Image (cartoon, helix red, strand yellow):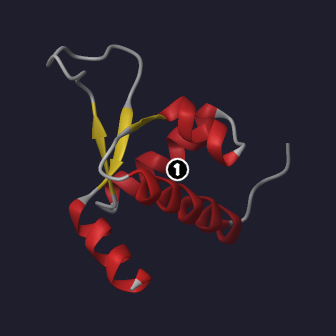
């Protein structure tokens, strides 16, 4: 499989951030995000983890009842990223 350039990865990350902004403040599972951007789940998870290191997204590892999710992860836009995105949209 050919390598994906950094520019393409940045565009995909931008698309993920846009999707999370459009559903904010809700969180979305990795599989739903992957389906939305038409990429496989492992690649999407790798991009999301990179965005988490940059403090742009937050990983939610508990369900609404407070129990730990063992295999699934939900993601939401961080407050910092939401404010920055809102500023550029206006």
Q: Compared with residue 83, is residue 3 higher up or lower down, i.e. above or below?
A: above
Does 22 appear above or below 48? below
- Position of 4 with respect to 10 (left or right) is right
Identify the residue shown where x is 22% and y is 16%.
68
Tell me where residue 52 appears, x and y as whole percent: 34, 52
- SS at circle 1: helix
Q: Is residue 5 left or right of residue 34?
A: right
63 on left or right of 27: left
Give how far across and how far down residue 81 sits, in percent: 31, 67
User: 30 or 86: nearer the eye?
Assistant: 86
Identify the residue at horizontal 38%, vertical 29% (top origin).
73
Q: Nearer the viewer, residue 61 or 9?
A: 61
Q: Is residue 30 above or below residue 56?
A: above
Residue 10 occupies which quadrant of the picture?
A: bottom right
- On the image, the x and y values in percent for residue 7 come to 67, 72
Residue at point 33%, 83% (across, down): 87
Residue lying furthest front in this view?
A: 90
- The x and y percentages for residue 36 are 63, 43
Q: Which residue, as the protein is rendered here, is positioned at the far left?
A: 66
Give the residue at the far right of this rendering: 1
**Label 1, residues with CA under 10 Å away: few <14, some 14-19, many ≥20:** some
Question: Which image quarter holds the C terminus?
Answer: bottom left
Residue at 14 percent across and 19 percent down: it is: 66
Q: Would you say 39 lies left or right of 55 here?
A: right
- Quadrant, the N terminus: top right
Number of dots carrying numbers:
1
Query: Disc 1 designates what residue?
Result: 47
For this rendering, which residue is in front, 47 or 64? 64
């Amino acid at each position: 499989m050919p390598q994906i350039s950094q520019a393409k990865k940045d565009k995909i990350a931008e698309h993920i951030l846009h999707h999370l902004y459009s559903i904010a403040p809700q969180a979305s599972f990795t599989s739903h995000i992957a389906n939305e951007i038409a990429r496989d789940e492992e690649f999407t998870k790798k991009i999301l983890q990179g965005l988490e290191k940059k403090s742009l997204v937050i990983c939610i590892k508990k369900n609404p009842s407070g129990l730990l999710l063992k295999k699934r992860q939900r993601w939401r836009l961080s407050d910092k990223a939401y404010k920055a995105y809102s500023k550029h949209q206006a």
